[in-house]
Amino acid sequence: MLCGISVFAQRKETFLKDNWKFSRADNKENININFDDSSWETVSVPHDWAISGPFDKEIDKQVVAIVQNGETEANEKTGRSGSLPWIGSGWYRLRFKLDSQYERFWLNFDGAMAEPMVYVNGKLAGECKYGYTPFFVDITPFVNKEGENILAVRLENLPESSRWYPGAGLYRPVKLIQTHDNAIEEWGINIVTEVIDTDNQSAELKLDVEFTKDVEMEDAPLSLILTSTDCPMLQDRISVSSSHLSIKKTVKDVCFWSPENPQLYHLNLKLEKDNGVVLDDKTVTFGIRTVSVSEKNGFCLNGKTRKIKGVCLHHDLGMLGAAINKAALAHQIKLLKEMGCDAIRTSHNHPSQWQMDLCDSLGMMVMAESFDMWIYPKCKNGYARFFNEWWDKDLNNLVLSNRLHPSIVMWSIGNEIPEQGMKDGNAIARSLQNFIHDIDKTRPVTSGLDRIDNALSTGFAQVLDVPGMNYRTHKYVQAYEKLRHGFLLGSETASTVSSRGVYKFPVELRKNHAYDDGQCSGYDVECCSWSNLPEEDWVLQDDKDWVIGEFVWTGFDYLGEPTPYDGYRPSRSSYFGIFDLAGLPKDRYYLYRSKWSDKETIHLLPHWTWPGREGQVTPVYCYTNYPTAELFVNGKSQGKKSKIQTQETNFSKNTELLDRYRIRWNDVVYEPGELKVVVYDEDGNAKGEKILKTAGKPHHIELSVDRKTLTADNEDMAFITVSVVDKEGNLCPDADNLIQVKVEGTGAFKGICNGDATSLEPFTKPQMKTFKGMLSIGVISSYEPGNIHVTVSSKGLKKADVTIATH
Ligand code: GAL
């Protein structure tokens, strides 16, 4: 029978990556087979047509009152959606050939921004509305099995359709899937962990497989052969005579998936004829784990209570815009894990498959969100235009495409949905939640509520499996008492604002404060009128068993929403991030790390280079997981201090609350030289120290690279951190030197970002000024194995270089 197998190829899945043609010219002729697109730009997908800029404040200038921020009067918002040219239409065209031995042909778009219309050989083959939804198009009726096919995709982005930078174009991968008539449906495999026994390391799994309808028409029953080398108890041969198969299996000696131990298993499914010919062959990756929420135990993973230490993330990747890249996504996840973060909320939309794959393999739990609005629009041309007609398809695709990911522990049906306070809101919430439960009974459903009083009085909050609170820490207790659940989640917390390396004096707790330079203070003492400081969440997380965790707004800065500078030019990206837009940690990173991670953290702020501040009070904070620390300025002790178990819970009363998690010396007088902290454990033993020195003049460039070896696949990336330092290697904290980047060899320059929310320098030209002495460079591999040589230079500074191998 082997010869049968060798002449009959099983499914073929191909990412359509290279040789796309792209144009902004909107012309009906673009769909035609004979249209001459030779003058169009050649691009690779994923692609974001807007990320190269230029920035322009007139783009998507919104004159609106942001109601959810408490605004009552409309005013001009310039950077709300990033000030990049994402508005308008764009076209992509691709010539492709099929393998004529197959019978079915599918295109899978993992998201396309926005309102994609998919034409194959001049005919409309499919469409979708929401730019974040993964969707399939069955192109079988439209294709030429022999010869060339033309795919044309039209995308359109309306002004005022987003509250943040959405990106533009085919920003997520496109896949061509070729199968026989008898095949496993795409998204047709589900493996659910029904029960686990942690004492015996065993689990009961339920496997469901959907086949194309044609399997029922076969003369003889087909067989499904299950093979797994890592979970051999799943092996089986099952006869298939209908389009749906469901079996249960007990597996032993398994390792349960968790962020700490992200064990994955693989199952190969072969659909075979009785003569041994394999019709379809697919391998899926899955994890074995359970998720539950209850009054008694809160949030449990594998039966163990844990508090979620999560961050919210928008989908853009800073310098890359919305165009996703596996290496960039992995880079983000690794940085978050280093901080002790164990969960991501994909705010406020469907995640990408690549991101979920990485969360599975690297160990990161996920709240997969769907919508930022339902029927009531938050911005004029937002998703509300489509909700009624499309919500079920969009939710269906979210759940079906993602249900195999063990990392996803919760679905969200929406963020701050205005209907939470409206009469019909709870009925809609119930429909959406039930819709999800019909497809996936294993994960709870949540929604982020910003008007808890309204959501309680309408019953909206009561409907949800998990009531999510966005901010409003002062309402937690009241909400908990009124809710039926006996627990609640901080679905969105903090929204503290800061700029990396910027410190404002005097150091004061401030809400909604705007400075002339468009920056926020790095002392982590500023937030919005509706939001709070990390500590206000932590007292609740620490003192109330019934708070099941939090998702901080946000892990990384993102393009758009430059609060508190919504109306200030030139700000065009957010200040909320624990990391800046370049992926560089702000001081707040160390504050979260000192709380979330067991790894030793000893961090001092601010920097110690303040010409002109001599003799002035310059408070010093230490972020550490040790309880006590002593500070020295040029060897003189500023006192030994310990964290204080204060009962304060509220930012507005006084600053004592901060002393529970930070060690602060508020009266330090600045003098240049050396700032040193020594930390002590509970028993008074000195455990470590950190020294900051006053920097001299910028002298040379220092580079550090996250990865020294890349895959030669034309998409793997390394991120290089550039620091301008003095002769001794101290960071020059105000350096704004213009940096030039030269990339030679088997790779190319991809992007650059300095994390300054007010910078209008393009991300895609190999030069930029450092911001507060630093910036980050992205370098991408080519298809060629060899070496990438990166040289970074700046006038008057000693240059630096780094070599990255590709193979
Ligand atoms: C929330 C909202 C987020 C973001 C954030 C900024 O209310 O859900 O999308 O706008 O405020 O603080």
Image (cartoon, rainbow, N blue to C red):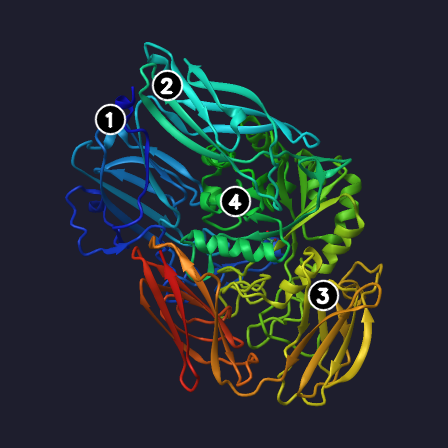
Q: Tag 1: residue type?
A: Val
- Classify mark 4: helix, strand or loop: helix
Q: Quadrant of the N terminus?
A: top left
The mark nearer the N terminus, 1 or 2, is 1
**Label 1 beta carbon within 8 A of ligand 1:** no
Q: Earlier in the sequence, mark 1 or mark 3?
A: 1
Query: Taking 623 as reference, is 37 above or below it?
Result: above
Depth check, front residue: 333 or 373: 333
Q: CA distance from mark 1 to mark 3?
A: 63 Å
Q: Nearer the observer, disc 2 or disc 3?
A: 3
Residue of label 4: 361
Assign a secondary structure to mark 1. Answer: helix
Residue 213, numbered circle: 2
**Quadrant position of residue 732:** bottom right
Above or below, 183 relative to 801: above
Which callout, 1 or 4, points at the residue further toward the start of the chain? 1
Q: Which residue is mark 3?
A: 624
Nearer the camera: disc 1 or disc 2:
1
Mark 3 lies on a secondary structure that is: strand
Question: Callout 3, which amino acid?
Answer: Thr
Mark 1 or 3: in front is: 1
Front position among marks 2 and 4: 4
**Circles 2 and 3 in contact, beta carbons < 8 Å:** no
